[in-house]
Image (cartoon, helix red, strand yellow):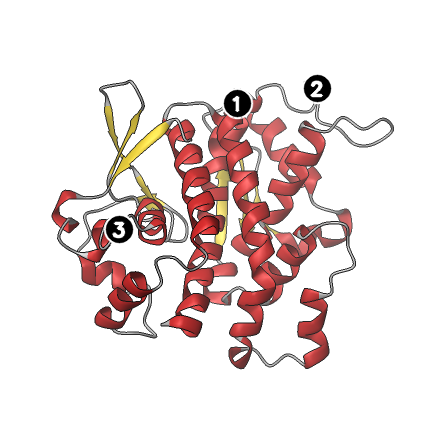
Amino acid sequence: MPEFNYTPPLNFNKSVFGGNIPAENYRVKTLLIILGLGVMQKKNDSKKLNLQYSYLTVPYQRSTKLKIDDIASNFSMVSRRELEAFFKNNLSKNIQFHKNIYDELLSAIGYLENSNPIVCFLYIYRLIEQIALCLPMVSLIDKSSFQFTFNEYKKLIENTAKSDLSVLKKYSENILDPSIGDVPIKFDFTNTSNPLQNVNLIIDFIPQKIRPIVVVANSSTSVEIKLKHIHIFIISFRNEYFHYLFHEKNINFSTLEYPEEFLSICNPIYLNYFSHLYLDLLKSEISIWG
């Protein structure tokens, strides 16, 4: 069970967008959280935290009060009435998956808000691994929008790599909407204790031969990367920081003196990236069951 509770906006209570009509709706609650709507509370703690950021803007930004029509506008392929019917009528489909996503996201945001960036990152990584499992399905459902051959789609499913995370790379760089994926995202380390070290670590994660493509701009305090390449940094940090491999590249205090500061800048960007993958998943489900 997550260590945090979530309460959707009270003015949505009488609508399916309140997250509890006709029963607890994990899709809706996850959507509201990534839009920065509602209140979070740590269990056994009376302090309530208003969610601060909307992760469905690119780049992410401070959340604002939204009407239901504003939420529905993220699904331009259907009307608001059709969207409400989808959320109501498909409550039990893929329910365990969506409950897992909701629980992991609630934990990630909770630890982000409570200034525990390392634990927050672990939950983000779990979210990324789970969403990666769905991307072949999302790709196939949306294939009419992308002029790929049968064999190209087949490769998304018959993946020969050791991890589903290779699918994540293909999806992010080749299928994610370019109006989202091509937007530069700024890792701004200006207010950290060692900005240049943090910038160098980000750049070091990128294979040398693709750095000119991946790095949009950089300075001694910041680096800009297109959203579609963010998977590189999530996977690389996990592999090099949490897995110490002999004779392999590993993160230590000489390469990252302040990991908490580093992740406090990166984690919101990683949640921004995840949120658009999750939105694509919801859209593909609407295509099937909407």
Residue on which the image places disc 3: 23
Residue on which the image places disc 2: 254
Residue on which the image places disc 1: 260
**Frontmost residue, 103 versus 269:** 103
* Upstream in sequence: badge 1 or badge 3: 3
Q: Nearer the viewer, mark 1 or mark 2?
A: 1
Quote the CA–CA distance across marks 2 and 3: 51 Å
Q: Position of residue 167 (x, y in %)?
A: 66, 58
Q: Nearer the viewer, mark 2 or mark 3?
A: 3
Residue lying at the far right in this picture: please name it. 247
Report whether residue 189 is seen.
no
**Residue 124 vertical placement versus 191 (above, below):** below
Q: Position of residue 92 (x, y in %)?
A: 38, 57
Q: In the figure, residue 233 lies in which quadrant?
A: top right
Please state if 39 lies on the left or on the right of 279 as rendered.
Answer: left
**Frontmost residue, 193 versus 174:** 174
Specify the amino acid type for callout 2. Ser
Specify the amino acid type for callout 1. Glu
Q: Tag 1's secondary structure?
A: helix
Crowd rating for badge 3 (residues with CA inside 10 Å; few <14, some 14–19, many 20+) = few
Question: Is the N terminus in the top left, top right, bottom left or bottom right quadrant?
Answer: top left
**Residue at the spot x=30%, y=61% of the render?**
87
